[in-house]
Image (cartoon, rainbow, N blue to C red):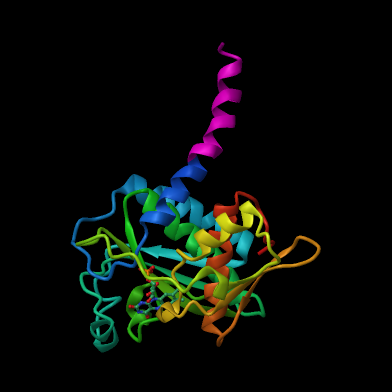
Amino acid sequence: MFILFPFITRGIGPCIMEQNLIDAMEKRHSVRKYNSVPIPSDVVKTLREEIERCNVRGCLDMQLITDHPDAFDGIVSKVMKFSGVRNFIIVTGHEDEGLHRRAGYYGEKIVLLAQSLGLNTCWSIPSPNHKKGGYDLKAGYKTVCMIAIGYGIDQGVPHKSKPMHELCEVEEPMPEWFRKGMEAAMLAPTSMHRQKFKVILEDDGDVVVNPTGGRITRIDAGIVERHFELGAGKRLFHV
Ligand SMILES: Cc1cc2nc3c(=O)[nH]c(=O)nc-3n(C[C@H](O)[C@H](O)[C@H](O)COP(=O)(O)O)c2cc1C
């Protein structure tokens, strides 16, 4: 019994984790108005540990900045209707071809973890005030975007999606795992909610997510990849 217990929990643990993230994907909606309740220190620690793991894998330098009410003030935040933002994740990374996609993929990993821990989030282009945000930018690194994080005044609202057939290219009959991946992809946040991506199932069984707009839609493609993997239940992308 004592010998078996660690093996049993190790086996069950990842399944529970995945299910939490799938639930988080369904519950997550962008939230732009936050209350002043601080993020508890154990939650901050959990987030920072996962951020560190993602930074190593993704050649990124994401940083969670807490209790910094100035970061999202100013005219753009007002136009975007952000209020009460005291915490944010700045997503920076080594400037190369894959930066935006990696930022999207690993940033969304943190967004979904945050949602599963009871927090709300909203992706944002960097606010003009972000330099007041008290974070370090490494040499050769670029700021890609910011993610507001905290306890929302509400839980946001589900977005309407384009129909599935407009967002993918796949031979019929569509495999069940691909359909589940697409349902998850359709829940992904995208810039201006334009859903400028196409998921393609290639003849050799590989799945490719193509951004179909400008550079910012490469971030969206990374986010969509993370959602698709969770929905399909398999690791598909080597971000
Ligand atoms: C890369 C990226 C950038 C975004 N930038 C902003 C922004 O600057 N301001 C804003 O209010 N929302 C921004 N959003 C949030 C989108 O508008 C939102 O995700 C989309 O409308 C879908 O809604 P949902 O997140 O509730 O599903 C951004 C989203 C992404 C993925």
Quarter of the figure with the N terminus = top right
Ligand 1: image quarter: bottom left
In this rendering, the answer to whether 18 lies above or below 222 is: above
Occupied quadrant, residue 207: bottom right
In the image, 122 versus 195, the foreground residue is: 195
In this rendering, the answer to whether 32 lies above or below 140 is: above
Residues rendered magenta in the picture: 1-16
Identify the residue shown where x is 38% and y is 71%.
Answer: 160
Occupied quadrant, residue 193: bottom left
Residue 101 visible in the snapshot? yes
> x%, y% of residue 10?
58, 30
> x%, y% of residue 169?
66, 72
Residue lying farthest right?
204
Q: How many labels does the image show?
A: 0
Residue 125 visible in the snapshot? no
Identify the residue shown where x is 24% and y is 61%.
Answer: 152
Identify the residue shown where x is 43% and y is 71%.
Answer: 161
Q: Is the magenta stretch mostly helix, strand or loop?
A: helix
Residue lying farthest top?
1
Occupied quadrant, residue 15: top right
In the image, 195 versus 129, the foreground residue is: 195
In the image, 26 versus 125, the foreground residue is: 26
Q: Confirm whether the magenta stretch covers residue 76.
A: no
> x%, y% of residue 229?
59, 56
> x%, y% of residue 194?
45, 80
In this rendering, the answer to whether 134 lies above or below 114 is: below
Answer left or right for 222 relative to 74.
right
Identify the residue shown where x is 66% and y is 79%.
Answer: 96
In this rendering, the answer to whether 212 lies above or below 184 is: below
Quarter of the figure with the C terminus = bottom right
